[in-house]
Image (cartoon, rainbow, N blue to C red):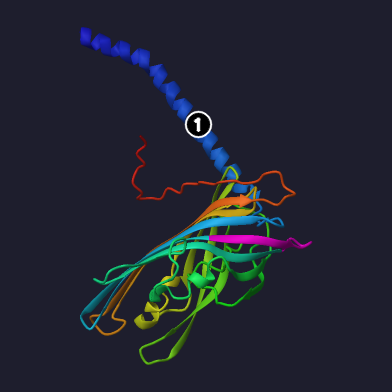
Amino acid sequence: MKRLTSLCLATLVMGPLGISIAQDETSTDRAMSAAERLNQKQKYKLAYRFLVDDQLRWDVEHTASTKAQIAGTLEETSSRSQSTKLWKVVDVDTTGNMRFVHSIESVKMWQKIGEEDPVTFDSNIDESAPVEFAGILEKIGKPLAMITISPEGKIVDRKSGSQQAKFGVGDICIPLPEDEVAVGHQWYVPTSFQGTDEQGRQQQLKARINYKLNKVKGKYAYVSFKTQVLTPIESEKVRSQILQQLTNGYAVFDLAQGKMIRKEVEWSEKVQGYEGPDSFLEYNGKMTEKFVNRIASPNEESVSTSENVEIKKRGDQPIIRK
């Protein structure tokens, strides 16, 4: 009887409290839902904004591993490069178009093929480059291209002695929508790939890069992008030639300062039978660009900034803080 009485008392005491907690949680959920609805309706303008004499730097790291088997012979290749790219803004016209000089300040490179000893190069230390990295040293610190972009990231003009590498992520800048957009908005940029099939025939593949504004948090806009091939690929040999252009990526855009402060791109592709029944090719890679600092125009008070935005993905290990 005492146990039953105690239980009844506990129910009487805790009952109203439980209802209150449930009501508080419901109110919180409603408030969050209202905030999410408001965020969905609010529109944002994504636009690049540089000033004359701006110097913008990003640290870039690119890692890749390849496994290729042909006629029973397996070859594995791994590589890693770390570099600092610099944009020096030389002009901004009345329409907002920005002209800048693109260069690489420094680079560290590492490559290993099969069981061979790895090959390395560090432009800050080495006076000469190994054969595998021939031509790199003479490009360090030199203007590689003069590029003009619109506020939406469209290439208005480019003067360069070399072709821009294609990694399935658009051009040197992520293109942005012309109008203000809400969270959830998607936009597409057409592109194309080319390959040669088993009979030596050239194939042109239509593709596009799908961009999406996933969320806005504070002054940061989070944009995802993915390469979508629209033409059916019927040849595994053709597929093997475009692996590096089939990507998933994520970027963080600073709405207040008008620049990308972080970009991550991943590759994870495999083809089977591209050079005979037992052949396969597997490619995995990741490229990260992280904004380092900005030496601003003399007309602007702020001299430098440093951004560090973490992007936590599904499947990431928890961060253990000491």
Q: Residue furthest top?
A: 2
Q: Is residue 203 above or below residue 46?
A: below
Q: Residue at x 44, y 75 (%)?
A: 134
- The part of the image, by quadrant, that contains residue 196 is bottom left
Magenta stretch: dominant SS?
A: strand
Based on the picture, tell me whether residue 94 belongs to the magenta stretch.
yes
> With 74 as the anchor, is 95 left or right in this view?
right
Q: Identify the secondary structure beneath mark 1.
A: helix
> With 318 as the anchor, is 52 left or right in this view?
right
Residue of label 1: 28
- Observer-nearest of 123 and 209: 123
- Quarter placement of the C terminus: top left
Q: Residue at x 46, y 49 (%)?
A: 311
> With 263 as the anchor, is 199 left or right in this view?
left
Q: Residue at x 49, y 34 (%)?
A: 29
Q: Residue at x 59, y 77 (%)?
A: 161
x, y percent for residue 82: 44, 60
Q: Residue furthest right?
A: 94
Based on the picture, tell me whether residue 266 belongs to the magenta stretch.
no
Q: Is residue 233 above or below residue 201?
A: above
x, y percent for residue 215: 54, 49
- Observer-nearest of 16 and 202: 202
- The part of the image, by quadrant, that contains residue 109 is bottom left
* Magenta-highlighted residues: 85-97
Answer yes or no: is residue 267 visible.
no
